[in-house]
Image: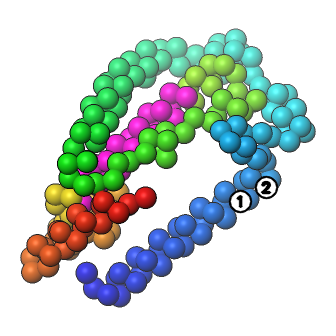
Amino acid sequence: MNERINQILQQIAALEDDLRSAVHEQESRVFFQIKGKRVEFERTVREAHLKLKKSFLRWLVIDRPQNLITGPLIYGMAIPLLMLDAFVSIYQWTCFPIYGITRVRRSDYLVFDRHHLGYLNWIEKVHCTYCEYANGLMAYMTEILARTEQYFCPIKHARKILSTHSRYRYFLDYGEADAYEAKLEEYRVALGKLK
């Protein structure tokens, strides 16, 4: 990879880390504090949240009756998601040690904290838990597959794609054959050093 491109990528990564830290610092300072696995709001914020909470009946009948129709379709996806979770996790637990790849921590991707929000009724909390699981699972799975791709074929596509995983930008350019063998081993070794 071109040295200039590599420098820019490192700057982008550093800026992304700074942005994440700044956003987290602002959120924690303004609205809540995280104590272990618990999220705690100031008393005045908790009271304001409770005043905004909609009753289940109002939410169901008045605001969103179409959710009754689509609910079975949405929640029917829970079974394939659970199966996908099991298969991807088993794959990682069995194959990653053989390849020398550091395992992906589920807890970094599957985060359940929206149930602490006092302005959500119980059905909204169930919806949030489902979405936290489904989106967290996709992020968890993406990282597992990204590490697999880095191990087997760290080559960019010839065509531009809309969205890529975090490792993709460091892959070899399409057609960069002269560096392939040396870089492939370098990429594989790096996977065993991940934190």
Q: Is residue 88 above or below residue 23?
A: above
Q: CA distance from mark 2 to mark 1?
A: 6 Å
Q: How is the image coloured?
A: rainbow
Neighbour class for label 2 at 10 Å: few (<14), some, many (≥20)? Answer: few
Q: Is residue 175 above or below residue 118?
A: below
Which of the image's four quarters has the N terminus?
bottom left
Q: Residue at x 17, y 69 (%)?
A: 185
Q: Residue at x 77, y 46 (%)?
A: 32
Mark 2 lies on residue: 29
Q: What is the x, y in percent for residue 39?
A: 72, 39
Element carrying mark 2: helix
Which span is picked out in magenta? Answer: 129-150
Q: What is the x, y in percent for residue 85?
A: 34, 32
Q: Residue furthest right?
A: 44
- The answer to whether one can see residue 183 in this image is yes
- The answer to whether one can see residue 176 in this image is no
Of residues 186 and 47, the one drawn nearer to the viewer in this rendering = 186
Element carrying mark 1: helix
> For residue 194, what is the image quadrant?
bottom left
> For residue 22, what is the image quadrant?
bottom right
Asked if disc 2 and disc 1 are in contact, CB closer than 8 Å, the reply is yes
Mark 1 lies on residue: 25
Q: Is residue 78 above or below residue 28?
A: above
Q: Residue at x 44, y 41 (%)?
A: 106
> For residue 95, what is the image quadrant?
top left
